[in-house]
Image (cartoon, grey):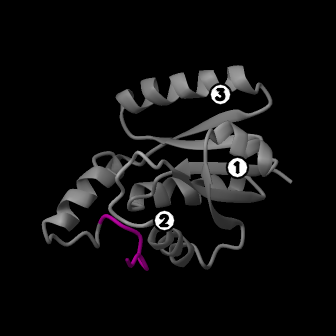
Amino acid sequence: MKIGVFPGSFDPITIGHESVILRSLPLFDKVILAIGVNSLKQNMFSLDQRKHALARCFSNYSKISVDSYEGLTIEYCKKVNAHHIIRGLRISADFEYERNIALMNRELNPDIETIFLISEPQHSAITSTVVRDIYKNGGDISRFVPKGFEV
């Protein structure tokens, strides 16, 4: 079984994430949306809220599952027998950042490959950080998050 792991904080999930996730489905038998837990990071939404939001957004896709993990993504991939990490790239700065992580992951475990999917142009400005800021200030985030997103 070909398993891809899409790691992230998903705080919150955006339509850019959704697009990359859905576009990755033909490449894998299973895609795990893996919420990385970092106790030092201050998230807006709780882990349970993010898990439920992801589960709701992708409830119609049997190939998608939701999980969480602590520690290195590469170790999580070994645990779930995944040989691919899925990452979305919005802008060139994302490439430089993600490339370095992919190279280090490859050094740690050459059996796990990182797959980069370029975001669709209309999603390139959408970030979880900006969506959180809009939400905190009472703005309408509905056009930036997947349909079915609730907190």
Numbered range of the magenta stretch: 144-151
**Badge 3 element:** helix
Q: In this view, does 5 lie to the left or right of 36?
A: right
Label 1 sits on a secondary structure element that is strand
Residues at marks 2 and 3, CA–CA distance in whole angstroms: 25 Å
Q: Decide which of tag 2 and tag 1 comes sooner along the chain.
A: 1
The residue under the point 57% across, 49% down is 7
Residue 135: percent from the left, percent from the top?
A: 22, 67
Mark 2 falls on what kind of element? helix
Query: Residue farthest to the front?
Result: 39
Q: Which of marks 2 and 3 is in front?
A: 2
In this rendering, which labeled residue sits more in front, label 2 or label 1?
A: 2
Looking at the image, which residue is at 67% across and 66% down? Answer: 65
Tell me where residue 29 appears, x and y as whole percent.
78, 58
Name the residue that disc number 2 marks. Answer: 47
> In which quadrant of the rendered view does residue 109 lie?
top right
Please tell me which of labels 1 and 3 falls first in the chain: 1
Residue under label 1: 4
Q: Where is residue 25 in the image (x, y as percent from the top left)?
A: 66, 58
Q: How crowded is mark 2: few (under 14 residues within 10 Å), some or many (20 or more)?
A: some
> Is residue 60 toward the left or the right of residue 130 in the image?
right
Write the residue at 42% across / 67% down: 46
Q: Residue at x 44, y 45 (%)?
A: 119
Q: Quadrant of residue 107?
A: top right
Extreme residue toward the right, this view = 1
Name the amino acid, label 3: Asn
Q: What residue type is labelled 2?
A: Leu
Q: Mark 3 points at which residue?
A: 105
